[in-house]
Amino acid sequence: MGRWCLRHLQLLPVLLLVVGALLDYNTSPHFSAEAFYTAAPMTAAALLSLRATILAGIGACAADFALLTHFGFIGDSGGRSELAAVATVSVFAVVVNRLMYFSDVRLQSARKIALAVQRAVLPEPPSAIGHLRIAVRYQSAVKGAQIGGDLYGVQDTPYGVRCLVGDVRGKGMDAVKAVDVALGVFREAADEEPTLVRIAARLERALVREARRRQGPEQTEGFVTGVLAEIPHRGDELRLVNRGHPAPLLLHGGEVRSVEPSVPALPLALGEFGADEDRTDTLPFPPGTTLLLYTDGLTEARNRAGTFYDPGTHLPGRTFPGPDALLDALLDDVRHHTGGRISDDMALLAVTRDGGGERP
């Protein structure tokens, strides 16, 4: 019923005019449907085009004039005042329609700019590298926004395919700057450093420098949670370094395994407060396995009862033809779980190893 109403909302101005005219005609001469006549053009201004708004205003004035003439009130001051009020609101409705139009144009322009920024900072990775199929999704908590503090990166390097998924503390331009710094360092270090631990160390240094440039609480409290993953071109293994980020998931044959780090570590830019060095966890990654990396926007999505979404309970027993299908299903699940209310940004990255052969 709700969807039907939304699809036919454009008929509301006409409905208001018809109902107003019928009430005016079939009730006492002293009853006025002025409220219906003024509501029609204002509703059209919010919902419809300029032409439709003008037509609604003309229709409202015509209906009011006809009913005032029918009851003999068009010649007295009360009737003329009512008609003048309807005409004034109709003109004002045209102005409102134009203001809303230009506001929408500016909003669309801002969205295009934001999308260009997203594509520059978070470019789409290739859909396949060797025997790996790759998919990413970015879901913003703010409707119409294109980028926030979540990040992902995928790079083919001499050491294998390396991935990064992270979440910057905070929002706004400071978060976007931190995203840009982290991804810039990752892209350079992924090609140069022989180990994930060395990449994490370079990210740590760069993000500490960036945090020191900030003002206020972000200067001392800025940090980035993240997971670095490496899938060598040869062999069936996976390497992970987790810096305070939600544990990745491994999916194979309907089974789901959460990969907790062997040694918990602090987020990036907070390494000086921890005593342990980063440790790389090595796991089997046979053909048919999918690695799922995500930010906490996925696991902190709540329904009306306050229950968090848990992919570890929603994914077991399900199989997907590829990483794209997995991520689409996850987003559908989250929207269903929350009723469409997304409260935090969400970055998802899935990598599936196909069967057969090794990279030449």
Image (tube, rainbow, N blue to C red):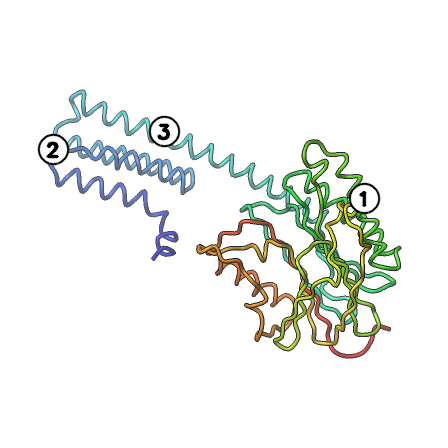
Q: In this rendering, would 350 be left or right of 210?
A: left
Instruction: Determine whether, in the image, residue 193 is placed left or right of residue 114.
Output: right
Circles 3, 1 touching at the beta carbon (< 8 Å)? no
> Which of the two discs, 3 and 2, labels the residue nearer the N terminus?
2
Looking at the image, which residue is at 16% across and 23% down?
75
Q: CA distance from mark 1 to mark 2?
A: 78 Å
Q: In the image, what residue occupies the spot 77% across and 68% down? A: 238
| First-in-chain label (1 vs 2) | 2
Residue 14: image location, x then y, percent: 30, 44
> Within 10 angstroms of label 2, few (less than 14), some, or many (20 or more) residues?
some
Q: CA distance from mark 3 to mark 2?
A: 27 Å
> Residue 91 bears which disc, if any?
3
Residue at disc 1, secondary structure: helix
The amino acid sitting under disc 1 is Ala
Q: Position of residue 159 (x, y in %)?
A: 86, 63
Q: Residue furthest bottom?
A: 356
The disc at residue 228 is none
Q: Amino acid at mark 2?
A: Pro
Q: x and y percent of residue 68 in the render? A: 17, 31
In the picture of the structure, the residue carrying the numbered disc 1 is 206
Q: Residue furthest top?
A: 77
Count residues near mark 1 (Cα–Cα under 10 Å), then give few for <14, some for 14-19, many for 20+.
some
Camera-nearest label, 1 or 2: 1
Give me the C-alpha separation between circle 3 and circle 1.
Answer: 58 Å
- Specify the label residue 29 is tagged with: 2
